[in-house]
Amino acid sequence: MNQKVYSRIAGTGGYLPEKILTNADLEKMVDTSDEWIRERTGIEQRHIAAEGQTTCDLAEQATLKALDMAGLEASAIDLIIVATTTPDKTFPSTACLLQQRLAIHGCPAFDIQAVCSGFVYALSVADQFIKTGMAKCVLVVGAETLSRIINWTDRNTCVLFGDGAGAVLLEASEQEGILSTHIHADGQYEDLLHVPSGISKLPSSDSIEERTMNMKGNEVFKMAINTLSRIAKETLEANGLQKEDIDWLVPHQANLRIINGTAKKLKLSADQAVITVHKHANTSSASVPLALDEAIRDGRIQRGHMLLLEAFGGGFTWGSALIRY
Ligand code: COA
């Protein structure tokens, strides 16, 4: 009988641009306060890409760190998937640009666009490739320069987001790794969280409102809370596991209140949820791999631990991954 093949995490990496924008800085830009931002979101600061620094630049730095942790050369990679909503160019994909930076040639490379759930979507796709024997070493990156699609005069959105990248190298292994992934979408909520213009729609719009993120925050908040506890339940049931079996919740970092609400429903203690939102704000597809990388590097997440990754974002899209690290 053939041995079961798992996608096992071989290495992780994260990268945040140098420039930090604090809540105090934002107080000078819009009618807001450090107190409001902290109380409603938990955010204290966010990183912002320098002029000319692109999503691929951030992705490359995160990837180099993941390769270093895994002790692998880039030539070992046989599939690249980049989750991003803020690609460098309309085309080629950021994954192709990243492949060029890594000086490797020929392996498939493509982007996934599922906004804040992008990394979990990419992880799910990568896992299918590994389980079916189509790939042996997959680079999965979540990278964003969200600052480029923010209206910096809109206090409803500009305080919430930041730039960054996180990378994970997955290797085919007989040891346990990704146990299951679950991804979903419901396009009927398009207007609650979106950028109205794009390449095909309103391409030459010079309205700042049309070119940047629009969000009905309160409605998104309620949907996120309900959907995330549903997906956690779905994930545990699919694996015949109980809440107590989870060692770490590695959630999308949109709002501390959403994370704490999800952790509470899972009966996890506050310190079993990996939290980076206070330092990074919401980095969309980069937020889950950045949090994962931080908790692996500081030793909280150890080999053998059970991790629940989850995310919710524009689309709406949502997803989860249960992983034995
Ligand atoms: N500073 C000060 N006041 C602000 C503000 C800011 N940065 N942003 C909004 N407000 C005001 C609003 O104008 C509103 O004022 P009003 O009552 O006079 O109309 C008031 O604060 C409350 O707004 P509301 O939207 O109801 O607040 P909230 O408690 O829902 O918190 C969010 C707002 C955006 C923090 C919260 O809804 C949220 O996190 N939503 C989900 C975001 C998310 O997850 N997005 C991405 C999904 S991936």
Image (cartoon, helix red, strand yellow):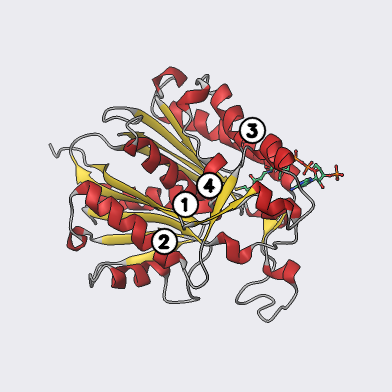
Q: Is label 3 in a helix, a strand or a loop?
A: helix
Nearer the observer, 46 or 60: 46
Kindly identify the amino acid type of the residue bearing the numbered disc 3: Arg
In percent of the image, x 50 and y 35: which residue is there? 275
The residue under label 2 is 58
The residue under label 3 is 257
Q: Assess disc 2: are there few (<14), some (14-19) or many (≥20) residues with their C-alpha within 10 Å of its C-alpha.
A: many
Q: Earlier in the sequence, mark 1 or mark 2?
A: 2
Where does the image place residue 59, in percent across and percent down from the top left?
A: 39, 60
Nearer the observer, 308 or 55: 55
Q: Is label 4 in a helix, a strand or a loop?
A: helix
The residue under label 1 is 286
Q: Is mark 2 within 8 Å of ligand 1?
A: no
Q: Is label 2 in a helix, a strand or a loop?
A: helix
Q: Earlier in the sequence, mark 2 or mark 3?
A: 2
* Tag 1 and tag 2, C-beta contact below 8 Å: yes
* Tag 4 and tag 3, C-beta contact below 8 Å: no
Would residue 298 be found to the left or right of residue 266 on screen?
A: left
The residue under label 4 is 280
* Tag 2 and tag 3, C-beta contact below 8 Å: no
What is the distance, in whole Å, between disc 1 and disc 3 at their CAs? 19 Å
Kindly identify the amino acid type of the residue bearing the numbered disc 2: Leu
What is the distance, in whole Å, between disc 4 and disc 3 at their CAs? 15 Å
**In the picture, residue 227 is in which quadrant?**
top right
Relative height, residue 4 to residue 266 (above, below): below
